[in-house]
Amino acid sequence: MLPRPLVGLGPSIRSNVRPILPIKKRAFPILLPGPSLVASRAFSLWPSQSNATPSPLPIETLPSPPPPPPRPPTMSELSMPTSLPDPTLWEPLSTLLVSLPATLHLTWPLFLPLLTLLIRSSSMIPLQLWQRRQMRRFATVIRPRLKGVHESLALNLRDSSRRKGLSYEQYEQEYKKASKEATRQMYRSYGFHPRLTMYIGPLINIPLFIFISLILRDACQRALLVLPFSPAHLPLPSSATLTPEILSNLQDLVTSSFLWCPSLCLPDSTMFVPLMVGLATLVNTEVSAKLRRAVMRAGKEVDRIEGRIAGNAVVGLRMGQVGALGTRGLTAAEKRRITVINSRREGNDGTRGLTTQTRTTNGPKEQVQEVVEAEDEEEPRSSRIITNAMRCASVAFIPIAAMAPVAVCLYWLTSNCLTLLTNLTFAYYDRTRERKERLDKILRR
């Protein structure tokens, strides 16, 4: 059989061509040269470049590729927590709080002032109205009756002290005990409690203020912790402590911005909001101190009336009354008291005021009036301590607010502004009513 390339040649050519014998298998493979880049002819016995396929080597002899180098972790992977945040004490209340804006379809910068207005209006304004009603009742009803009771009590004790031969110091002690008991019975009959009226506002508003601040801070901390999570990281709904809805509400809180602050859960880096919180607290402290002086002046008026009544009982000796107190020599304090009260009644130019230590050009009436006005304006020691403590707290609020989230600072600022507005409104109303009462008294005269 002739090879395929010789088919079709003439008989003379075929006779000269020797047949190709089959190649015997050898023990070793024949190394053939690699495919040449020269174009093969049609009658070439070697396979062409297009038909040449390299003999595959065994899989064991192929080298395995080296493992890729480890990829450095990204910032999101580094900040990604390994587990869900643990439940806290305030978690149920903070969960309820963060669900309200989505339910009411409000943004967080609008929801926080409205929440503050609702809470403070429902707790602070009713208490202030009740306090003002109690103080008004004391000024118009209790104090006039108390004044009459003290006057009659002073006269009765004066007569009994003269018969017993008591000194003025002993009489004063007896009068203080009797006046305190009469005042207590008068307060009980009218259901008036001075200390409760004065301190019920701070005792309710301050704990409520701290309570809401702690809930807001807990919500901000949880929102920062769950920010990298997605619903795929949550466990099964049957055992989950953080549902997809709560996760969405917390992420809405942490992604909400306020003015130049990128997030409500972060502190204000510009320090503007903390400074505004401290300034509002300081202004509110000064206004509250001024109003507290006006409230305490009503209670101090009773003590001053008691002192005048006790002095009038001794001054009765000047009217020619003779008794045990008149037979002994008066002390220097009693003489000064009698001199001041006589100068107030008669206008004697040869006397001086109660606390006047140097010579002045004013007459005794002006000096006594200055003493009375100084007593009116002087604040009790406990009230001064409260005012100074609130001033220090106003300054200390600035660094505290600098470390607090913007959401908590916004609650503090709104609360202080609302308290300031309420105090100014009540002060304006009191001043208007006082002017009206003075005008009515002038017209009656």
Image (spheres, helix red, strand yellow):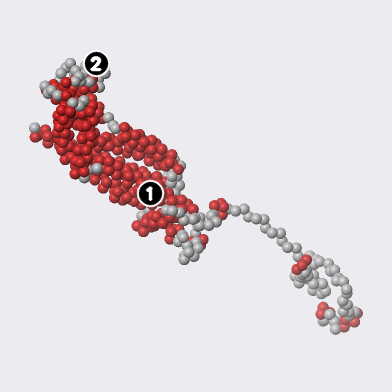
Q: Residue at x 22, y 36 (%)?
A: 180
Q: Which mark is residue 211?
A: 1
Left or right relative to 132: residue 259: right
Q: In the displayed image of the protein, which residue is found farthest to the front?
A: 164
Res. 215 in view: yes
> At label 1, which amino acid type do we have?
Phe
Residue designated by label 2: 359
Q: Nearer the viewer, residue 147 or 295?
A: 147
Q: Residue at x 49, y 53 (%)?
A: 225
Left or right relative to 35: residue 251: left
- Which image quarter is the C terminus in? top left
Place of residue 4 in the rendered image (x, y in percent of width and height, measured from the top left): 81, 80
Tell me the CA gap for discs 2 and 1.
58 Å
Res. 313 in view: no
Place of residue 421 in the rendered image (x, y in percent of width and height, measured from the top left): 28, 42
Neighbour tally class for label 1: few under 14, some 14-19, many 20 plus, Cα within 10 Å: few
Q: Which mark is residue 235?
A: none
Q: Residue at x 78, y 66 (%)?
A: 61
Query: For residue 350, what is the image quadrant?
Result: top left
Q: Residue at x 17, y 28 (%)?
A: 164
> At label 2, which amino acid type do we have?
Arg
| Placement of 174 over or under 95, stated as above or below | above
| Placement of 349 over or under 101, stated as above or below | above
Q: Nearer the viewer, residue 306 or 285?
A: 306
| Placement of 346 over or under 184, stated as above or below | above
| Placement of 16 over or under 201, stated as above or below | below
Query: For residue 20, what is the image quadrant?
Result: bottom right
Q: Helix, strand, or loop for circle 2?
A: loop
Q: Comparing marks 2 and 1, which lies closer to the viewer?
A: 2
Q: Nearer the viewer, residue 64 or 435?
A: 435
Place of residue 351 in the rendered image (x, y in percent of width and height, measured from the top left): 19, 18
Place of residue 176 in the rendered image (x, y in percent of width and height, measured from the top left): 22, 33
